[in-house]
């Protein structure tokens, strides 16, 4: 998820697939929308990974984004916004395929290198930060902005953030802030720091040489992470189990940045904040990424029909008045029973992995009937 609306491209393929040497290169190709993901793009990426997994000529897969602004600004939230009013069936299908892709990337048997250059938000994190090799640069701005639109971090974001050192992930999720490349390294969202001016050389080197060898050659020492200097107050203030206590701790902190963080948190959807915190705490206890994606699927579908998602998208993307009117309006008004309902089994829909298996079985039966 992200705040970037869909911008139609003029008959351009949404994903470019290139084979050069031993490299399979996936290029997200919607630069006017900062390569925001569509259902078609998710399908094309999945198909490419399927084909290249069994192609002995492909040793490494590389992911990058077209244009100068970034890898990917997330998903097409305007389409989700409109689908929410029609029952959310298309959104459920999109998320199922997207989350399956996130899990697939995390366990892909060949080296998968993601160039997290420029803007990497929401769904962009999902197709990059689960990779075996995650490259950031001095231009990287990575984040999960969901609470600002009344939504909850997904695409495995709660898995990643719940496993960041201390409470850095909680801070990032509740403030919906962006992080630098060094911050991403500190938080475990990336592995390698490379100057953006050398990404073309890096890509060319991957055509002929093993990924481990190439990345070792191009990596350089990253600058200090800005979040490292703030980790003491972040760990102190975000260690609580409810958002109200976290905000109170931020306001009482001696750190001026903590007080500023409190103001940012209080500007987000109260319901989304509470569900996000509970999502993170629950994700810490879940054993693996697929389990967390299962939880996120339930949460996302519940959030889709809640009033704050529609209001958040309206305020940030449709009308752009930047003045959302959240319902409920305050943290105190959010009932725990309502928070818990986001994690309840889906009413009338199968859960993530069960539903995907059913769809594959149905597709197989249809194919057999058509033969």
Image (cartoon, grey):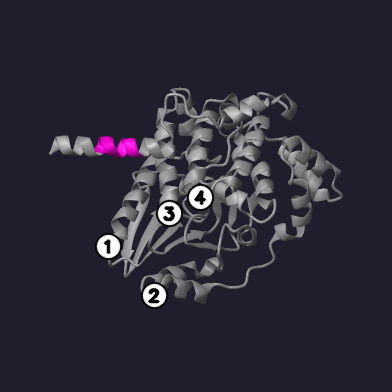
Q: Is 261 or 341 nearer to us in this picture? A: 341
Q: Which residue is mark 3?
A: 105
* CA distance separating discs 3 and 4: 14 Å
Q: Secondary structure at mark 4?
A: loop
| Label 3 crowd (10 A; few <14 / some 14-19 / many >=20) | many
Q: Secondary structure at mark 1?
A: loop
| Label 4 crowd (10 A; few <14 / some 14-19 / many >=20) | few
Residue in the picture at 67% in, 42% down: 174
| Among the two numbered marks 3 and 2 on one chain, the one whose residue lies closer to the N terminus | 3
Q: Secondary structure at mark 2?
A: loop
Residue 44 location (% of width, % of height): 34, 48
Is residue 358 part of the magenta span, yes or no? yes
- Whether pointer 4 and pointer 2 mark residues with C-beta atoms closer than 8 Å, the reply is no
Q: Is residue 93 left or right of residue 128?
A: left
Residues rendered magenta in the picture: 357-363
Q: Which residue is mark 2?
A: 209
For residue 272, which quarter of the picture? top right
Our reading of the magenta stretch's main secondary structure is helix
Q: Which residue is mark 4?
A: 288
Residue 254 location (% of width, % of height): 87, 50
For residue 342, which quarter of the picture? top right
């Amino acid at each position: 998820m992200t705040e970037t609306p869909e911008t139609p491209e003029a008959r351009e393929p949404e994903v470019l697939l290139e084979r050069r040497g031993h490299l399979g290169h996936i290029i997200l190709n919607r630069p006017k929308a900062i390569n925001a993901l569509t259902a078609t793009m998710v399908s094309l990426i999945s198909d490419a990974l399927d084909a290249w997994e069994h192609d002995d000529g492909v040793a490494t897969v590389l992911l990058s984004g077209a244009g100068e602004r970034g890898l990917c600004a997330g998903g097409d939230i305007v389409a989700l916004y409109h689908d929410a009013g029609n029952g959310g069936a298309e959104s459920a299908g999109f998320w199922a395929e997207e989350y399956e892709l996130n899990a697939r990337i995390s366990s892909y048997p060949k080296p998968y290198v993601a160039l997290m250059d420029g803007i990497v938000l929401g769904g962009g994190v999902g197709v990059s930060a689960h990779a075996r090799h995650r490259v950031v640069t001095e231009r990287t701005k990575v984040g999960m902005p969901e609470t600002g639109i009344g939504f909850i971090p997904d695409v495995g974001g709660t898995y990643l953030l719940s496993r960041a050192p201390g409470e850095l992930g909680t801070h990032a999720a509740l403030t919906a802030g962006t992080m630098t490349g060094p911050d991403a390294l500190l938080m475990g969202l990336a592995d390698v720091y490379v100057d953006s001016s050398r990404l073309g050389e890096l890509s060319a080197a991957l055509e002929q040489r093993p990924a481990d060898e190439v990345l070792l050659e191009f990596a350089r020492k990253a600058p200090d992470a800005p979040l490292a200097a703030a980790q003491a107050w972040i760990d102190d203030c975000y260690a609580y189990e409810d958002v109200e206590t976290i905000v109170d701790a931020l306001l009482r902190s001696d750190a001026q940045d903590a007080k500023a963080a409190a103001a940012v948190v209080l500007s987000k959807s109260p319901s989304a904040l509470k569900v996000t915190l509970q999502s993170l705490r629950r994700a810490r206890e879940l054993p693996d990424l697929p389990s967390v994606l299962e939880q996120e699927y339930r949460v996302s579908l519940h959030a889709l029909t809640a009033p704050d998602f529609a209001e958040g998208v309206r305020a940030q993307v449709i009308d752009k008045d930047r003045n959302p009117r959240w319902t409920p309006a305050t943290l105190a008004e959010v009932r725990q029973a309502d928070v818990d309902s986001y994690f309840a089994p889906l009413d009338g829909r199968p859960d993530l992995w069960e539903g995907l298996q059913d769809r594959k079985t149905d597709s197989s039966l249809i194919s057999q009937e058509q033969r």
